[in-house]
Amino acid sequence: MRTPATLFIAALTAAASAQATNPHIFVANDGNLEGSVSSMRIEPDGSLTLVDRVITGTRTSTSQPCPGCNTYAIDLSPDGRFLATNHAAGDTGEQVTIYSVSQNGTLAVVDVLPLAQGGLDIAWVRDDLLAVCITNLSGSNLLRLYNWNDQTNQLSLADSDSAGSFLTSIVVHPNGQWIYCNDSFGFTVRQFEVSGSSATLVDTVSIPVYGVAISVSPDGRFLYAAGGISAGGNAFAGYTIDQSTGALTAMPGSPFTSPGQSPKGFTMTPDGQYLYVSHGTDATIRAFSVDPESGVPTSLGLSFDVGLQGTLQGMDTLPGFLFALDESTAIDGIAGAYTFAIDPNTGAFPPVPGAPVLTGGISPTDVVAWPGAACPADLAAPFGTLNIFDIQAYIALYNTQDPAADLAEPFGTFNIFDIQAYI
């Protein structure tokens, strides 16, 4: 009987083409009775195929403790290897969950960090550093940093900083040097500077809106803060970011008026050309063009309505596509993950045929998109170079039947087709 290593060496002599990991979205499902994360493959036309769903907690009544229920916020490490979620499960204990992401998009829980009090947002600072917001209406709101060890699959507390009276949104600058935190009750945005595994408060900026969510442009030059029901219920603020210090300066004309009601979140196209704003009261997505120099947004008069008030949830983009979540079938009987095809010339964003697609979970709430690995065969350091260490890493995964080695159909079976897919 030939060993997997023998099969692998034999396969190296056969003609085979490399198989890149497909683009995916990962969805946090905020069910009161069941928390879960869904993995959905993005097909070339933008349509979605459900690949996997991992349940992190279940209960029959909200009176029962369930730290893994209410999977609320989700983020993907910069290298695409690990997902992190927090859980807004109530006052009986919550948690942070870490998942490994396999090349075929399947997921596995690799660490669970219990928290006496959790929060409403989470963000990777680096591949080895995770930012977690701790939200507490009756106590301290904190920005916590956790070191992530991908060898032992463990989180460890590195730093904790006071972050105002109602922290619900954190965003990391693309350079990893600054973290911005909202404080809706205080009408402020706090800027922290990261050094090693610690964060230091360097500025607190007053803003004219609640700032229920904040977002930084992909190039790191602009920050936007959603007003929610404050400032007339249709406003959001914009700031330029000093690339040397991270300091915020209000854009000309800020705050800006949206045609929608209660701006609640943002996503931008990767090229920074278009800004899409989600709204709570009228459940619409509104499109804006963005001045490349000033960051000032201009409404394009384009919108999409998902239905009932409060049902429009998280959004994200990849080149050519916008993804958005509808958490409820109320009124229209429709819920799930939408894909919209973005017109690069006009910013128009019609839904692709078949949208939305059910995530398999309850109340899809947050989403993060992954463009696909540039080279999924690059499994071991030094990354950026393909060598015998990558082959050895794959053999080790294959020998232990790790899901990361299950690259070809039929999934769940490890055979020569997986080896051919790898090489």
Image (cartoon, rainbow, N blue to C red):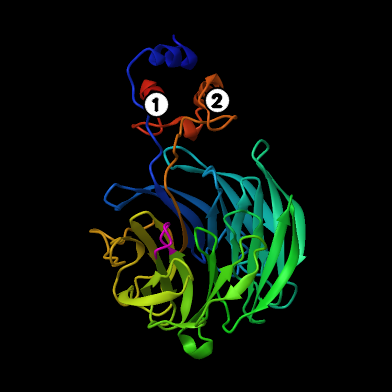
Q: Residue 379, how many percent across, how many down?
A: 53, 31
Q: Give the range drawn in magenta.
A: 268-273
Nearest the eye: 25 or 95? 25
Is residue 89 on the magenta stretch?
A: no
Nearest the eye: 67 or 193? 193
Q: Which residue lies furthest to the left in this view?
A: 353
Describe residue 64's horizontal placement relative to residue 334 as left or right: right
Label 1, residues with CA under 10 Å away: few <14, some 14-19, many ≥20:
some
Query: Which residue is labeled 2 in the image?
Result: 393
Q: Residue 331, how many percent across, how many down?
A: 31, 77
Query: Which residue is labeled 1 in the image?
Result: 418
Vertical relation: 97 (above or below) 139: above
Vertical relation: 157 (above or below) 32: above
Given the image, on which type of amino acid does mark 1 rest?
Answer: Asp
Ranked by sequence position, the earlier of labels 1 and 2 is 2
Q: In which quarter of the image is the N terminus?
A: top left
User: How far apart in space, not on screen, are marks 1 and 2 (Cα)?
Assistant: 14 Å
Q: Residue 15, how many percent across, how many down?
A: 32, 17
Mark 2, secondary structure of its residue: helix
Describe residue 132's horizontal placement relative to residue 17 as left or right: right
Residue 118 in view of the camera: no
Describe residue 153's horizontal placement relative to residue 211 as left or right: right
Q: Quadrant of the C terminus?
A: top left
Identify the residue at image location x=49%, y=64%.
31
Mark 1, secondary structure of its residue: helix
Nearest the eye: 89 or 292? 292
Given the image, on which type of amino acid does mark 2 rest?
Answer: Ala
- Figure quadrant of residue 166: bottom right
Identify the residue at image location x=57%, y=55%.
174
